[in-house]
Image: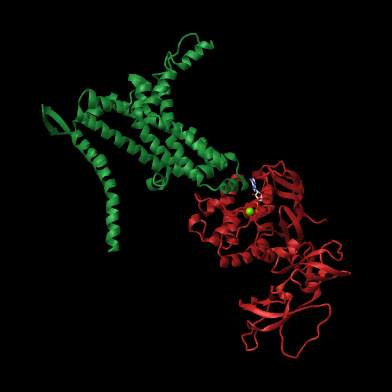
Chain colours: A green, B red
Amino acid sequence: MKKDITRLSFILLFAPFALWIILLIILPHIGMVIISLREKVAPRIYEFSFANYVDFMQEPIYWNTLLRTGSMSLLVTVLALIIGFPIAYYIAKIAGKRSKGALFLLCLIPLWVSDLIRAFGWILLLRETGVVSTALQKTGLVSQPIEFLYNDATVIMGLVYTVILFMIVPLVSTLDGMDDAMVEAGYNLGGNGSTVLRRIIIPYAMPGIVSGCIVVFMLTAGSYLTPILLGGKNSSWFTEQIYEQFISRYNWESGAAFGFLLLFFTSIVVWLGLKLSGQTLSSTVAKS
Amino acid sequence: MSAEYDLECLDVSKNFGGVRAVEDVSFKIPKGSFFSILGPSGCGKTTLMRMIAGFEDPTRGDIYIKRKSVLNTAPNKRNVKMVFQHLALFPMMNVFENIAYGLRCRGETAGEIERKVKDVLERIALPDVGGREIHQLSGGQKQRIAIARCMVLDPDVLLLDEPLGALDLKLREAMKIELKLLQHQFDTTFIYITHDQSEALVMSDNVAIMNEGRFEQVGAPQELYHDPKTAFVAGFVGDNNHWTGKINQVIGDRLDLVTETGLSMTGHLRGNAAAAAGGNLTLFVRPEFITTRKVEDGTSEKISSDDNCLTGKIDSLLFNGANSRILVRGPGQELIEADIVLTGGTDDLRPGDPVRLSWPREQTMCFLA
Ligand SMILES: Nc1ncnc2c1ncn2[C@@H]1O[C@H](COP(=O)(O)OP(=O)(O)O)[C@@H](O)[C@H]1O
Ligand SMILES: [Mg+2]
């Protein structure tokens, strides 16, 4: 009797979760794979084929864009880690108990504003007639207006800004669990600052680092607004290609293939990252 | 050759804002001895140790290791190693790497490291655990690895901050003896911090009793137990019957006094203060110095006039094998603790028995309040 009740409550609790997974994740992906594996041979007539994938392979622009998106996302991930780690360390270990909460909240503030508004904020600052350019002219440092938008550096900066929070949160939570005595032991046994960082703090924070990197990489590679708005038409972001196939060319078959390729490619990168760092998904993302 | 001191502290003080954690502490520790700092929690023991290790700077005073001041030496350059309260072993390294960490920091060769780690593991009697992960070790093994990790570096002084606090009672008893043996084996100066008096008394050559940031008394365990210099030391070390009272008469170092509960006693003045009639006293009598006799009708034993004598009724009996004890309801209705021997025979003391308690005058340790 009691067992039945536990089972029932488990099913009731689990049902919405299962529905969500099935309806919004598994079904669309199955559908996408099916769509991507057909070719239009005549109006409304489709045949099974790998033509969409072959197209992707044969057109350098496509796979170059994918590689570029991948490598820029990696760069964004690395930058977010390098900038986020000291911030997370400060919040978790150096700040006092009371300022900790305030700092954490401060990190969350950008999330209250939508992606779109944040990107427009950057545009206001960085365009030719924007705040930075005007200020530089006023102070006489430059004589002509400067366009800061529409280059890779701006895109990367904007992306780092958008995703860095997702790096800081898991880092703070792992570093928070580290006993201060461990760092002191590291010094006491003769280590200097860099030894303690390399051999104690970073290995200890590894689960947080890896899970932060995975989340940031996936978010960046799949982001659309920031690269488009800050990078302009030439940002060559892979999501842009997908969008174009689906919406502009109305070519759902190749759009689906691209979408699936993006998923496949980022998964491979994440898998490689996990292998290289000697971590597993359950020891990182599941933990923090 | 004059005595060699591994560690000397001279008037060391530490303030945290308005809090005086450590005040004017001075001591010298001879080479190769086992020195304990015993005090209630919050009295500044950890702060003192962290200053020796270099994690806090003293507000005043100086610290010498091997006769050299270390105030301007960074923590990683001081040859004092520390076993932390929760050990702080590195969970992401296995046992071998934990022990090798310090050697690698020193830049020793792989062969040297291998040899030294193997050697130290043998000395702590855990020769085969090198490849294990930290979470695979038992509490006692972790303890020994934490010590080995320090000892492999051959420190001048090893600091231990309540290292047995996290262990269960049985293991703690075993580790007490083991620590003492390890100290003998490595022949290194150990400074051991604890709030547990039995740990300090069992293991140490010398013990410092610390209270509210100050050292109350430094001495061998027996000396502290039998000849405490302050009321705090008498009360903190060992079990006691504790009274407050007033002096009636002073005859040399003999005091005739009466407690607040109305018991008349004779006592022995401790400490260096001069006593006068009418002065307030704190007094202590240890349960093991009290002799208990059943009061039989008609028999009255003669006792020397110097001794103290009370009659009462046994209120309860606390059986604990060799450490059994009775609580006696005295004339002033207060409870007095006395140690007794129970043989299991028919003439053992039982609750309700009328008894006479007596103890020598010297065992009433009196301190001016
Ligand atoms: N970093 C610190 N800041 C402020 N006060 C501290 C700090 N460390 C210790 N104290 C205070 O100093 C006193 C002694 O602490 P501690 O040395 O940890 O005592 P013990 O180890 O004997 O329990 C305590 O009152 C404690 O609150
Ligand atoms: Mg302490």
Image coordinates for residue A17, horizontal then vertical, percent? 29, 46
- Which quadrant of the view contains residue A170? top left
Can residue A75 be seen? no
Q: Please say if B202 is above or below A34.
A: below
Establish if A137 lies above or below A276.
Answer: above
- Identify which residue, B119 or A59, lies in the foreground: A59
**Residue that appears at 45% across and 13% down:** A146
Position of residue B235 measured from the top left corner of the image (x, y, whole percent)? 72, 64
Q: Is residue A168 visible?
A: yes
**Of the pair B168 and B245, the residue shown nearer to us:** B245
Q: Is residue B31 left or right of residue B343?
A: right
Q: Position of residue B369 (x, y in %)?
A: 78, 61
- Image point (76%, 73%), residue name: B263
Q: Position of residue B363 (x, y in %)?
A: 78, 72
In the image, residue A213 sits, relative to residue A59, either above or below, namely below
* A156 sits to left or right of B246: left
Q: Quadrant of residue A269?
A: top left
